[in-house]
Image: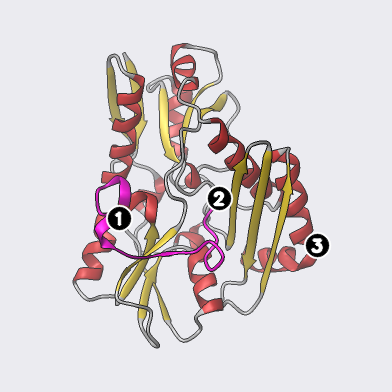
Amino acid sequence: MIVIGSRGSKLALWQARHIAACIGGETRIEIIKTSGDKIQDVPLAAVGGKGLFTKEIEEALLAGTIDLAVHSMKDLPTKLPEGLTIAAIPEREDPRDALVGQPLDVGKRVGTASLRRSAQLRHFRPDLQIEMLRGNVDTRLRKLDEGQYDSIVLAAAGLRRLGWQDRIRELIPVEIMCPAVGQGALAIETRDDDGPAQRLARSLDHAATSTAVTAERALLEVMGGGCQVPIGAYATVDGATIHLRAIVVSPDGSRLVKGELTGSDPSKIGTALGRRLLSEGAEEILRAVA
């Protein structure tokens, strides 16, 4: 039997069940509560983003109490604990952010927990009121329906996976709101031991998605960012050609550094674009956030 570790939210469990179905055979899902699930009253960026939703799951992997873990790729730090590996990245869902609720008219209250989203909103729409919104997808939708916010911004992938695509008012173009690194993609993490779980997981890897996400994560790594930094990156793959765009925005939206790069080696493209953005002012922005 393959034991799959997962957070307990509806979305996390959907993802774990989806991978279990893809693997086939006998599986069991072990729910593990993470630090990020326990902290609900402060912005994630204020408590440090690296590993908030993965640390306890990775500890269970290393201890051998689970065989593989299913993560939202955007939650997974670029540096993994020794002995663990990303065994597969399945085909990506829609990577874009989605607006749910009312249109973005002047003065509207928009809820988000993401520093990346709030920074880009403040840059492009300084007329809006950006407010903190924590909780799982269903909790955030409930708070919107209760009138605590006029609109909220969520990942389109999560809404689609949970069957709530009809709640999407607008898909925000990546030119306006660059997605989080790995947004819409899943990461299957296992022990790096060539064991049964790792071998099973490898068969679920999607080459184009893996290449795109590798470029995005290479950029994030060279910029020293976790999952709660005002960095957006999105890569597309067309044959052997990779196109990567990225953006860094100060939390108040006043400063923005962005760039694009095309090439064939995902790690080299990500590293090169990351270094370029750092030299063009992103380093100063990120230092102020840290």
Q: Distance between the residues labelled 2 and 1?
A: 19 Å
Q: Are the two marked residues, 3 and 1, in contact with CB atoms closer than 8 angstroms?
A: no
121 relative to 29, above or below:
below
Disc 2 and disc 3: Cα gap in Å? 20 Å
In the displayed structure, does residue 176 sit left or right of residue 7? right
Query: Identity of the amino acid at label 1?
Result: Val
Q: Where does the N terminus fall, quadrant-wise?
A: top left
Confirm whether the magenta stretch covers residue 155. Answer: no
Residue bearing the label numbered 2: 181
Give the extent of the magenta segment.
160-181
Residue linked to disc 1: 137
Relative to 259, does residue 53 appear above or below in the rendering?
Answer: above
Which callout, 2 or 3, points at the residue further toward the start of the chain?
2
Q: Can you see residue 78?
A: no
The residue beneath circle 3 is 279
Mark 3, secondary structure of its residue = helix
Q: Mark 3 or mark 1: which comes first in sequence?
A: 1
* Nearer to the camera, 30 or 255: 255
Question: Residue 283, position in %: x, y?
Answer: 73, 63
